[in-house]
Amino acid sequence: MDCNYLVWTAYSGLGNRILTIASAFLYAILTNRVLLVDGDKGTADLFCEPFPETSWLLPSDFPIKQFKNFSIGSPESYGNMLKSKVVHSSPAFLYLHLAHDYSEYDKLFFCEDNQQYLQTIPWLILKSDNYFVPSLFLIPAYQEELMRLFPQRDAVFHHLGRYLFHPSNAVWGMITRYYDSYLARADEKLGIQIRVFDTETGPFQHVLDQVLACTFKEHLLPEVNTQEPIVSPRKAKSKAALVTSLNSGYCDKFRNMYWEHPTANGETISFHQPSHEEHQNSDKKMHNRKAWAEIYLLSLSDVMVTSAWSTFGYVAQGLSGLKPWLLFKPENRTAPDPPCRQVLSMEPCFHAPPFYDCKTKRGTDTGKLVPHVTHCEDMSWGLKLVDQN
């Protein structure tokens, strides 16, 4: 009876789940709630317990059995209660629907008046596939505390992620075996994360062209000499490129290109891809283990290239503390020009933020209200945190 709780519901792919646990944890800190994590979709199998001498896992005898089935249409949702004007004075629990398809009423969660009401509810049950932290920075009641917690605005997920997400022993074994075998002895490690949002599996030539255009332009990979058979010196600088993709075709093409031709600067380049699952399958234990291991391996890179819109890439860059080169999303299967740019901050993008001024009760551009919350490089309507300097 002395505590208030926030229950996080397992939903969507692994990258989204990691980002939403971090968002939920920060909200729990700001509102003095105990965070409890739904152990479905392998949460307990993937992560160590982050809090000493206790568990963050929701007990199996949690009495609200139907919470996993809550959705945008559920009458228990706060948004639906606001819409139908049946907000009760003190219900035992409320469901917060903050997923990508949430309604204008659900989005009122981010208004200060509504936050004051939610403080009176002992149990909040959250479902989200969004990194909603940027909009927490726009709620006046939390701004002072957030400024104290994160004087460097563009390192919020970096700190939350490194605190919360430690690979389980099974996943840590996969990480260390791969790192020691293929990456540890390289002078430099380059991470290349390729996520293609297409109904076909690929590989696609325009994606290959885009990755090469980006890595050559930004001098992340040396160009190859197709004219003469240069022999690299025995003490040449070595670079290991870790490629993560659902498809093996891209890594194969890179590897063949650098095998068939010498590099123009004499560097030796090796390419490594731990897995190629072909399709995302977020309900399979080994699929999730491989995904988490690859995110962590990417985060150990010295330099990183990531794909637009990809939460997998957002998590890797946040854990690493690097500002990656972001591959813009291709349109009409054509490599964009320019192919990539370095991001303003390592922070993930909030893909579905509200565009609403709670004071005037009118629409507004929430990416222009404060200097440290701006629009994302890869999604013009998204929001992300940047360092205001």
Image (cartoon, rainbow, N blue to C red):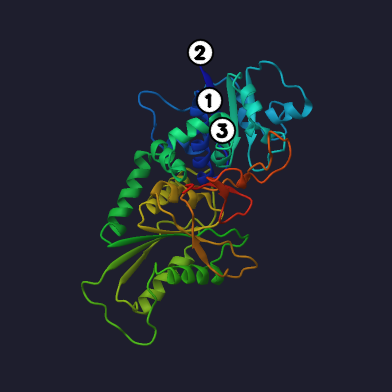
- Residue placed most toward the observer, 270 or 213: 213
Q: Looking at the image, which residue sits at the far top?
A: 1
Q: Nearer the viewer, mark 1 or mark 3?
A: 1
**Secondary structure at numbered mark 3:** loop
Q: Position of residue 268 (x, y in %)?
A: 30, 71
Tell me the kind of residue under disc 1. Thr
Would you name the residue on which mark 3 appears? 9
Q: Which mark is residue 120?
A: none
Q: Earlier in the sequence, mark 2 or mark 3?
A: 2
Q: Amino acid at mark 2?
A: Asp
Residue lying furthest left in this view?
235
Residue position marked by numbered label 2 in the rendering: 2
Neighbour tally class for label 1: few under 14, some 14-19, many 20 plus, Cα within 10 Å: some
Q: Is residue 39 visible?
A: no
Mark 1 = which residue?
Answer: 31
Instruction: Choose the circle earlier in sequence order: 1 or 2.
Output: 2
Residue 9 appears at what percent x and percent y? 56, 33
Query: Nearer the viewer's eye, disc 2 or disc 3?
Result: 2
The residue at 61%/47% (across/down) is 367
Q: Please state which amino acid type lies under the numbered disc 3.
A: Thr
